[in-house]
Image: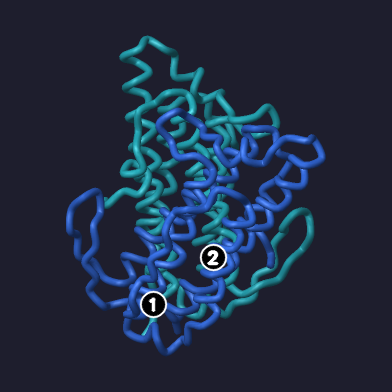
Chain colours: A cyan, B blue
Amino acid sequence: MSVSMYDVAVPTFQKQLSGLEAFLDKAAEQAAAKKIDFAVYLGSRLYPDMFNLTRQVQLATDFAKAAPARLAGVEVPGFPDVETTLPELKARIAKIQALLAAYKPEQFEGSEAKMLTLKVGGQDVTMTGREYLLHVAFPNFYFHCATAYDILRHNGIEIGKRDFVTRR
Amino acid sequence: MSVSMYDVAVPTFQKQLSGLEAFLDKAAEQAAAKKIDFAVYLGSRLYPDMFNLTRQVQLATDFAKAAPARLAGVEVPGFPDVETTLPELKARIAKIQALLAAYKPEQFEGSEAKMLTLKVGGQDVTMTGREYLLHVAFPNFYFHCATAYDILRHNGIEIGKRDFVTRR
């Protein structure tokens, strides 16, 4: 008795991306109500050498895009990091949601034991698909989603952990 | 071909808790070098109504403690939230690491389909063990680990994502 790699990977990215999009929308509504240009939030960061909100969203979506593709053995689609507005970021999320929805469970069969080589901190590291998903993709993905949330909260946006851990 | 619930749950909490402990230690060294009382960092938060660093660490460890216990069907050990220093928080992490190390894979057999009822936002919600682990425990756990990291970074501690996504 166990769980399939598809069931571990795909619904996780789907749910958390929809949570990310929902709290970005909520933030944009609050910014509009206060007549603050949302671009100010998108450019905000927690420390000068940390990434801003736009980049956090791009990076979160990158992991949601790359991890299932690598596990399924399909080419990782390249998205240029050109978004500067919330509608553009939402379009990026929507493209990745469409990719996620199109995966079939059988594409992930055996991916837990498949050896993958990837750059980690500039070095080639080889690991199993299971290790890659659980110990590289998930922590990176959640890191960027949580930091996006933290940037918004730090700037006074009223969202709560229930917006982060969504039940959708 | 698939992965066991034990392999999804236990190594995830073990690795990320050891990452959390390592970046807290690194932060404490930097604070000491600057002659800043680490209690200042432990009391820091990103916004007045967010939890401080101490509480983020307590909550991260709570999920690492509760999720495997619920899946394995053993009593969730209660730890009072009394820590006020880094050595005390490290002792809490060590207690949970000892619990995690003691689990046997067979204790998790069938847990993916086991129905669990828990309080989510004050309401009783029933879900499978798989849903609970992947869509409640993991996002909450990573949320508090990442927010702990973000609090330290925001306060000038020099750690990087490689300290968060550890290869240990």
Image check: A112 left or right of B121?
right
Q: Which of B152 and B115 is in front in this view?
A: B152
Q: Is residue A5 visible?
A: yes
Q: Nearer the viewer, residue A32 or B21?
A: B21
Measuring from the top left, give residue B144's x and y in whole percent.
Answer: 48, 49
Question: Dividing the picture into quarters, in which one does residue B78 lie?
Answer: bottom left
Q: Nearer the viewer, residue B76 or B104?
A: B76
Q: Residues within 10 Å of mark 2 (few under 14, many from 20)?
A: many
Q: Give the quadrant of the C terminus of chain B.
A: bottom right
For marks 1 and 2, the one nearer the N-term is: 1
- Residues at marks 1 and 2, CA–CA distance in whole angstroms: 14 Å
SS of the residue under disc 2: helix
Q: Is residue A130 visible?
A: no
Question: Dividing the picture into quarters, in which one does residue A127 lie?
Answer: bottom right
SS of the residue under disc 1: loop
Residue that mark 1 sits on: A3
Residue that mark 2 sits on: A133
Q: Which amino acid does label 2 sit on?
A: Leu
Q: Give the quadrant of the N terminus of chain B.
A: bottom left
